[in-house]
Each structure stands twice: as C-alpha cells, then as structure tokens.
Image (spheres, grey):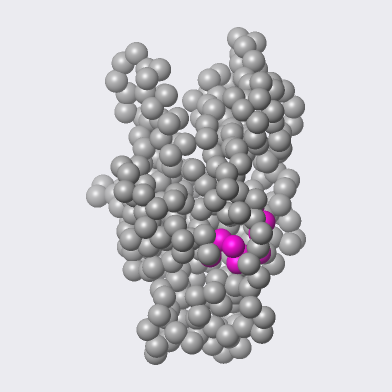
C-alpha cells in the first residue's frame, strides 16, 4: 500500500479543541463525500476557511482500490470487520491497519456515504447510552445533537444490536460449528462502531443516491455544519436543528437461496404493514413483515447467505 494511495489531510489550530475526522469513499462507488472533501481541502489550503480551534482530518478516498475500480469493495467490504489485523491478507486488512489508528487519534467521526436506490438522505446513529456487552456507549447525547444539524430529516439506529440478533439466528440454524465471517459479531463493526469502541463517537451520513448531483452538496453542507456545531469554524448562518423522523432497525432477513425473490421492487423506507408479503423463498414460502414499519437496505443482488433486507419501526428517540 503506497503513500499516494492512502492520503489524509489534517488542519490544526493553535487552540485546543475537538479532533474531527471526515471520511469519503469507504465504499469506492460512493463518491459524493470525496467530491465535497476535495472542495473543502482546497478552501482550507486557500485560507478561505480558517480553523478556530481543534484539528480536522480529511480522508477523501478511504478505500483507494475500490475507488479506482468504481466498485463498492476491493477484496472485501472495508466497513465490515474493521479492526487491526496482525496478519493482514486482503487489501482491506492492510487498509484497516492504517485506518484504525487514524480513527483512534480523533474524537468525532463524520463518515459520508451514498446509496443505490431512491430516497432522501438520512443519518445512521449509534445506540443510546448503555453498559451492555454489544456496544457500550456514553456519548449518545452528543451523537444526537450532531445528527440533528446535518440537514437531514431521518435518523436510523439499532444497527449492531440487530446484526447481533441475525448472527445468533445463523448460528442456531447450523447443525455443526462453523467459523464464517458473517457469523461473527465483529463482522458488523464498521467505521462508526470502531470509533465508539475507541472512546469517541460518530455518525454515518447517507447523502443520497450514488449519482444524485445533489449528494455532494448534502455532504459539503454536513461537513460545514459539523465544523460549526463543534465550534471549529465561524459560519455565516448557524446550522438549523431539524425535526427528525426516528426509526430503529429490529430485524435483518437473510437470503437463504439465490432463487429467493422480492414481491416487488422495494426501496429503502418503503412502508410495510404487519403480515405484508415482502418476498418469497425458493420453496414459495412467503416472507412477511412482523409488524408495521419500513423496509431498509433491500438488496436484490444479494447472494444466498447474505443479508437480504432489514426491517425498521418508529421510535421516539429524536422527537
């Protein structure tokens, strides 16, 4: 892995303050963050934006192999099983050994993504404060405050807890011990989960569709709002606190067979009602919603054994 491929750009103030890191292109085909970050690096270099306090680090292209290919992943998904690797084998293992220490040196993370389907931008946040075994956390209030000034109107939480329940189901369905990545709780750990495990906090902003021309604008506005919110720059106008719809993931449904099919073309946050048929198994058994709510991250291209879709329901966390 060369220096030219793995670049971060840091700007420091003489005054102590938050240490913010902003990532683009964790997935190589999600380039809105890259575009916004490159614009802002140029503005910091030109001194049209000045840092009042703290430090900000920009990583325009977090996964250069996937970015060069124009694909989601290089050898594997960087945003799964993100941790240091004593014996790295795949490209993303080496990349994790560079990225994890970089994240640890910061307090706050803004990770900029985009999505495949249609729909409005939204933010993924972590759990409420807890001392549990899955994802202990103590900065829920700070994450909530950050999420509310990013310019989006929907927040989703429950990722790692829902992923853990899926792992337990997969393990119980096996008739013999297995050691597959998707049956390991660490498989659900990405950038924000790793950041929280290191004593910081962070959110994932899904800025819109991959090719939406407005997605880089959403990313840029979110970066400037975050810097302003943390007191790191002066802004002409203060970020507006949004009234937000709050959803919580509660179930992940796997594809059991490559011939499992959806009942229609689903998009993230399409509403579903209790008992509604979402798809059919290869055996023609219907797959239905357990309760009223929404479908999230439906993946028509998933393979047998992969996550097929998530289900979410309302909660009052962001009211």
- Nearest the camera: 219 or 133? 133
Residue 121 magenta: no
Q: Is residue 241 visible?
A: yes
User: For the view shown, which residue lies furthest in the left direction?
Assistant: 86
The stretch of residues the image draws in magenta is 146-154
Task: Give me the residue at 51% from left, 53% from top.
Answer: 125
| Quadrant housing the C terminus | bottom right
- Residue sitting farthest toward the top: 283
Q: Quadrant of the N terminus?
A: bottom left
**Up-down relation of residue 218 to residue 285 (above or below):** below
Note whether 183 is above or below 315 in the view shown.
above
Image coordinates of residue 151 in percent, x first then y, are: 66, 64
The picture quadrant where one finds residue 149 is bottom right
Query: Residue 237: image x %, image y %?
Result: 67, 80
Q: Nearer the viewer, residue 2 or 46?
A: 46
Q: Residue 198 or 134: which is nearer the viewer?
A: 134
The secondary structure that most of the magenta stretch takes on is loop
Q: Give the total number of marks visible in the rendering.
A: 0
* Above/below status of 238 relative to 91: below
Placement of 279 over or under 156, stated as above or below: above
Q: Is 311 on the left-hand or right-hand side of 199?
A: right
Side (left or right) of 215 relative to 96: right
Looking at the image, can residue 78 be seen? Answer: no
Q: Is residue 150 magenta?
A: yes
* Image point (46%, 61%), residue name: 141
Residue 279 in percent (x, y) is at: 66, 22
Please report the residue visible at 54 percent of the width from the left and 83 percent of the height from the top: 233
Query: Which of the two residues, 162 or 73, is positioned nearer the viewer here?
Result: 162
């Amino acid at each position: 892995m060369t220096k030219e491929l793995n670049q971060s750009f840091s700007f420091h103030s003489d005054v102590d303050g938050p240490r913010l890191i902003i990532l683009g292109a964790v997935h190589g085909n999600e380039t809105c963050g890259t575009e916004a970050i490159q614009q802002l690096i140029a503005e910091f270099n030109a001194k049209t934006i000045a840092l009042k306090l703290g430090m900000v680090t920009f990583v325009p292209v977090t996964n250069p192999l996937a970015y060069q290919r124009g694909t989601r992943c290089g050898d594997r998904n960087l945003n799964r099983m993100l941790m240091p690797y004593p014996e790295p084998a795949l490209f993303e293992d080496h990349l994790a050994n560079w990225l994890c220490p970089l994240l640890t040196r910061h307090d706050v993370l803004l990770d900029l993504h985009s999505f495949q389907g249609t729909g409005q931008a939204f933010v993924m946040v972590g759990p409420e404060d807890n001392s549990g075994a899955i994802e202990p956390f103590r900065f829920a209030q700070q994450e909530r405050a950050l999420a509310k000034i990013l310019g989006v109107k929907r927040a989703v939480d429950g990722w790692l807890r829902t992923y853990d329940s899926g792992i337990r189901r997969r393990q119980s369905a096996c008739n013999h011990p297995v050691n597959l990545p998707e049956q390991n709780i660490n498989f659900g750990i990405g950038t924000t989960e790793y950041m929280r495990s290191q004593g910081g906090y962070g959110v994932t902003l899904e800025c819109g569709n991959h090719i939406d021309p407005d997605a880089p604008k959403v990313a840029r506005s979110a970066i400037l709002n975050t810097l302003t919110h943390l007191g790191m720059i002066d802004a002409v106008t203060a970020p507006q606190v949004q009234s937000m719809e709050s959803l919580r993931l509660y179930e992940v449904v796997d594809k059991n067979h490559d011939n499992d099919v959806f009942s229609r073309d689903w998009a993230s946050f399409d509403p579903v009602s209790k008992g509604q048929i979402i798809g059919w198994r290869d055996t023609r058994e219907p797959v239905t919603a357990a309760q009223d709510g929404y479908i999230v991250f439906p993946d028509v291209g998933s393979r047998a054994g992969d996550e097929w879709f998530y289900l979410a329901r309302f909660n009052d966390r962001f009211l």
